[in-house]
Image (cartoon, helix red, strand yellow):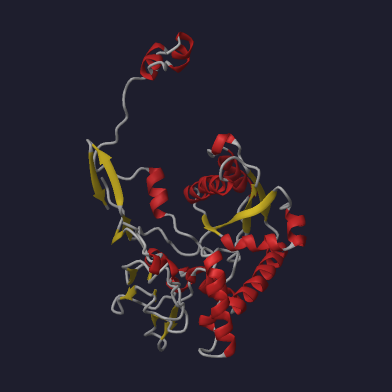
Amino acid sequence: MALLTWLERLHFPDWDDPSQCMFHRVTIDLDKCDGCKLCTLACPATVLEQYGEKGRKKVRVRADVRGCASCNNCYAICENGAIEATRHYDFVGYYRQLGRGEFMKPRMF
Amino acid sequence: MAEGAARVLAVEDPEEVEKEAGRGARIPVVPEGAEWNAVERGMLERRSIRKYRKAQVPAHVIRRLLEVARFAPSQGNCQPWKFVVVRDADMIRGMEDFCVAQCRKLSEAFDYAALPRGSLKYRLARIKARLLGRLQPNALHPVPMSVATNIAQGRFAVFHRAPTLILILADKRGIGSPPIDVGICGTNIVLAAQSLGLGTCWIGFSQLLNQSREWCERLGAEYPYEIAETIAVGYPVGDTTHMISRATHETFWFEGGKKQVLY
């Protein structure tokens, strides 16, 4: 059986349609986030930004920038474990991800 | 089978050869559940670094990286690479400016998602992206295209203002598939760099420099060479060594006449 149907192979997803290009699978725990902004430095897609008043600053995902690649650089740099991508990005059609399982930390065998 | 042919095909038992040479017989199996060793830990803790301290990396440290690169495996030992080290901020800025200009062209021509929806420009870009996407699905992919737009709009730097760049040029005449050898070679560089406390980032967008005759001449990226990849090197800002989660991948495992699917 083909891994991608011909219909899928011919379908190029619309870059500006979030139901066809599924990015931004990152969750932020606002209780743990101290708004230090380190994750905004580490993000290769520049989708993170600091917001809020002085003393109560937090980080959020920007609405106007797309392309979070679930790389977890934000998790790697966060001292508080406040931010994490928990699923890989995915597409409908030609670029649909194949054979991806759960997100997991390095496992020791 | 002819006697001569049989003699050529006969392979000596390598373990017998080893024993006769008086070399060790112990098989070094790592115990189950053992802690990560230094190499594994380095691989797992390495992230792509895009913010660097201003301090330059001492020259001898870069020479160490080039030295481990030289011993990377390659197809037929053809070593289809040439290194170009750039440590002058002015020159890096010039390379940055050229790549940004190219990203701006790319973004304006194709990234309809960054244009006002429904406008004539939007519709034109979308048609172009769809047509060309079928010919170049790897380049006109939604991920790099959004990065090109971030670069074009000044949110993101191509070379991340790293103090040192190591360009890896590929010799197009290499055996088999030179870009794979370049990748293997560069992996030696980034893992050695990690072990020395340095941060690195692969910069595929540096291939845009191949479009400039001036930069190609200056960097020596003339036939048979082309810029395959660039590795930014510098001391990282922030501690990025918390091990992260990643997707597991479907893996076929054939053993004992059976097929298993693992993740």
Quarter-of-image position of residue A24: bottom left
- Residue B132 pos. (x, y %): 57, 70
Which residue is at 63% across, 56% downward? B165
For the view shown, which residue lies furthest in the top direction? B3
In the image, A28 versus B259, the foreground residue is: B259
In the image, A63 versus B226, the foreground residue is: B226
Vertical order, B255 against B42 (above or below): above
In the image, taking residue A96 as reference, residue B75 lies left or right, namely: right
Q: Quadrant of the C terminus of chain A?
A: top left
In the image, A23 versus A16, the foreground residue is: A16
- Residue B143 pos. (x, y %): 48, 69
Which residue is at 33% across, 45% downward? B36
Residue B64 appears in the figure:
yes
- Residue A79 pos. (x, y %): 36, 67
- Residue B164 pos. (x, y %): 63, 57
Q: Number of labelled discs?
A: 0
Q: Quadrant of the N terminus of chain A?
A: bottom left
In the image, B94 versus A17, the foreground residue is: A17
